Amino acid sequence: MPVTRQVKFFRNGRNQAVRIPRELEFAAEEGVMWREGNRLIIEPAKKPTLLEVLARLEPIDEEFPEIDDPPPDPVEI
């Protein structure tokens, strides 16, 4: 059976807030919240993968200059 606790809402400036009891804490710094009817759902925010970050980047529309890139000098070991 899931852990449940009755909590009280309070005001923090212009925001409504609730203290999350220790046994229900998230091990995250950020979260996402949304409402479904009378339910308020809070989840830890998932960190985007590198592919998700790259997919959001705009294409670069500029020409890159040619770079002189000779092979490295031989090294004797």
Image (cartoon, rainbow, N blue to C red):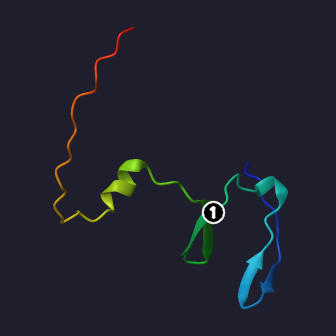
Which residue lies at the image location 21% right of the left edge and 33% below the top edge?
70
Can you give x and y, in whole percent of width and height, for residue 63 in the image? 16, 61
Which residue lies at the image location 61% right of the left edge and 73% below the top edge?
39
Can you give x and y, in whole percent of width and height, for residue 9 in the image? 79, 80
Q: Residue furthest top?
A: 77
Q: Which quadrant of the structure image shows residue 73?
A: top left
Can you give x and y, in whole percent of width and height, for residue 41 in the image? 60, 67
Viewer-side residue, 58 vs 3: 58
Above or below, 29 against 7 in this view is: above
Above or below, 49 against 29 in this view is: above
Which residue lies at the image location 41% right of the left edge and 49% below the top edge?
50
Viewer-side residue, 52 vs 19: 52
Q: Residue furthest bottom?
A: 14
Which residue lies at the image location 75% right of the left edge and 79% below the top edge?
17
Q: Which quadrant of the structure image shows residue 69?
A: top left
Image quarter of the C terminus: top left
In the visual, does 57 lie left or right of 29? left
Residue on which the image places disc 1: 30
Above or below, 17 against 71 in this view is: below
In the visual, does 53 lie left or right of 35? left
In the visual, does 49 lie left or right of 27? left
How many tags in the picture? 1
Q: Amino acid at mark 1?
A: Glu
Can you give x and y, in whole percent of width and height, for residue 18 in the image? 77, 74
Category of crowding for the residue at label 1, using alpha-carbon neighbours closer than 10 angstroms: few (below 14), some (14–19), many (at least 20): few
Q: Which quadrant of the structure image shows residue 57?
A: bottom left
Q: Secondary structure at mark 1?
A: loop
In the visual, does 73 lie left or right of 25? left
